[in-house]
Image (tube, grey):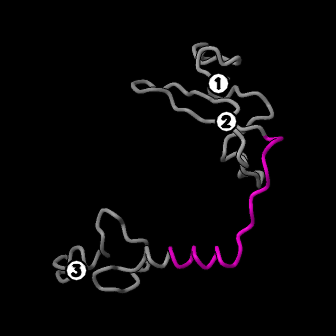
Amino acid sequence: MSARFWDPDGTKFGIPTYPWRLAPDGLATRRQLRLRGLRPGGQDIAAQILRPRRRREPLTAYLYRIDLARPVRPMTPAKWSALAKANAARRRCPECRRDAGYVIPPTLGTCVTCASPEEQRAA
């Protein structure tokens, strides 16, 4: 246990702080809430977990109260449609205007065929 991160009163860090894997029951991260079909629902951060790292500042995970969490809002047909259009736009090459069949990497900006046409001709 890392005693330097043990601050359940919040006197040292401003909010209650616990070491990695030692959070009390009744608190959960956003991911843990999502696995239960919940969301924070506008509540403030209840506590935090700090995980030490060797050469950098510690990793921080914020915790929320499970009893104040609300159910996740369901996806409506309009939201599903908007999501499908956004994903389709990420697959369309801006240079050749074709569906690449995969999400175009932002580092390339175009499909692989347009990014390196000389390699495609040689193959």
Question: Which residue occupies 76% across, 55% down?
Answer: 37
Q: In the image, what residue occupies the spot 75% across and 66% down?
A: 74
Task: Name the residue tied to disc 1.
Answer: 15
**Relative to 99, residue 4 above or below:** above
Q: Is residue 94 left or right of residue 51?
A: left
Q: Secondary structure at mark 1?
A: loop
Q: Earlier in the sequence, mark 2 or mark 1?
A: 1
Q: Secondary structure at mark 3?
A: helix
Q: Which residue is mark 3?
A: 120
- Extent of the magenta region: 66-86
**Above or below for 79 versus 53:** below
Please tell me in which quadrant of the rendered image residue 119 appears: bottom left
Marker count (numbered): 3
N-term-proximal mark, 3 vs 1: 1
**Do callouts 2 and 1 mark residues in contact (Cβ within 8 Å)?**
yes
Can residue 8 be found in the magenta stretch?
no
- The residue lying toward the viewer, choosing from 24 and 47, is 47
**Mark 2: amino acid:** Ile
Q: Residues within 10 Å of mark 3 (few under 14, many from 20)?
A: few
Whole-Å distance between the Cαs marked 3 and 1?
56 Å
| Circle number at residue 109 | none
Q: Which residue is mark 2?
A: 45
Of the residues shown, which amino acid type is indicated by label 1?
A: Ile
User: Residue at image x 50%, y 27%?
Assistant: 58
Examine the rendered structure and indicate whether residue 94 appears above or below residue 63: below
Q: Amino acid at mark 3?
A: Gln
Helix or strand or loop: what does disc 2 sit on?
loop
